[in-house]
Image (cartoon, helix red, strand yellow):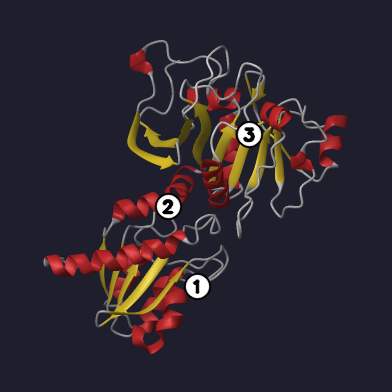
Amino acid sequence: MIILTLDKEQNFHEKMMRRAIALARRGIGRTAPNPAVGCVIVRDGVIVGEGWHKKAGTPHAEVHALRRALDAARGADVYVTLEPCSHYGKTPPCAEALIAAGVKRVFAAMEDPNPKVSGRGVEMLRAAGIEVALGLLETESRLLNEPFIKQVTTGLPFVILKSAMTLDGKTATGSGDSKWITNDRSRRYVHKLRAMVDAVMVGVGTVAADDPQLTSRIAGGRDPIRVIVDSALNLPLHSQVLHLHSPARTVIATLAGSGPEVEKISGAGVEILQCQERDGRVDLRDLLARLGRMGIQSVLLEGGSRLAGEALRLGLIDKYLLFYAPKIVGGEGPGLFAGRGALKMADAVQLRGLKIRRFGADILIEGYPEGRCLPA
């Protein structure tokens, strides 16, 4: 085990790992069901190779970095955001590639939570005489791969609730008008978010009311899988999501398994996902489990209020992204969550790890729930 003692040396190690994390971020949204990983190879204080995992099924970060370093990798230090893999999948083990290259030391930010790896890569490297240090900027690395960690350890995707509201908590006016609450800068950021997640999910009511495309309309952006929760298959056949020129598929989560409604929707080229029932509607837990088995790591939950309310009550939301515009609607406009809420303030879901960002006059509050579900 490497013991880091000198402040100067520690600062250098952290600088190299931050570079590896920055590289890893370039792959976010394109690597599922694999994690986003970055790698930097350093010899005599100089970066000789670097790379990141660009897409599932393609070479991993370590391989890209080794290809750039070539012979300079021998005797070098390697900084990687996740423990090098030790098993054969669609690509050979990265641990074996590092051993063959003759690297001297490996700094891994965290152990791989995947049971197929989980410490085996470290053992393989140490058995070959390579020094290994774990835990350098581990917190940052975990934040980088929140969806991967959630899906590989629980089988469920990481659910991010995104909503735009006025300062008095309205998601629309009393007449149902919701365009536009937030400004252009906020909406551009949401399109970037869509390009970074595996799927975006809305209820059929949102589709009927707003007719969204649920695409990522930014240069070079990748469209996420579109998931429409529609228990009774009431989706209007003229909806834009059924007539898009997009490589990403549209999935309809429903209770219906046959009949003319299924035939009509299926004829529009979408995928029907028949789920278990809960209180007369699609069971969100069952839906998320099915999405997890499809390799989906992250879901951006965008609406509507019934869907958000059910996700809140069941404790299915892992992260909140709440946009507030400097507007007051008043009256009886709808709020973010429909249905039963907390009866006592002590039972309210408390957010932690708060971050606040500005998008012009709009404010984004980001946080994680301490209690996943409301008391029954």
Which class describes the residues within 10 Å of circle 1: few (<14), some (14-19), or many (20+)? some
Residue topped by disc 2: 145
Residue 261 visible (yes or no):
yes
Nearer to us of marks 2 and 1 is 2
Tell me where residue 294 appears, x and y as whole percent. Answer: 61, 48
Using the image as rendered, state which of residue 38 and residue 292 is in the foreground.
Answer: 38
Report which residue position mark 1 lands on: 92
Quadrant of the rendering where the C terminus is positioned:
top left
Q: CA distance from mark 3 to mark 2?
A: 24 Å
209 relative position to 101: left or right: right
| Residue at image coords 54%, 50% | 192
Q: Amino acid at mark 3?
A: Val
Residue at numbered disc 3: 202
Q: Is residue 37 visible?
A: no
Image position of 64 with respect to 179: above or below = below
The first of marks 1 and 3 along the sequence is 1
User: Which quadrant would residue 11 be assigned to in this image?
Assistant: bottom left
Q: Nearer the viewer, mark 1 or mark 3?
A: 3
Q: Quadrant of residue 187?
A: top right
Type of the residue with mark 2: Asn
Secondary element under disc 2, as helix, strand or loop, is: loop
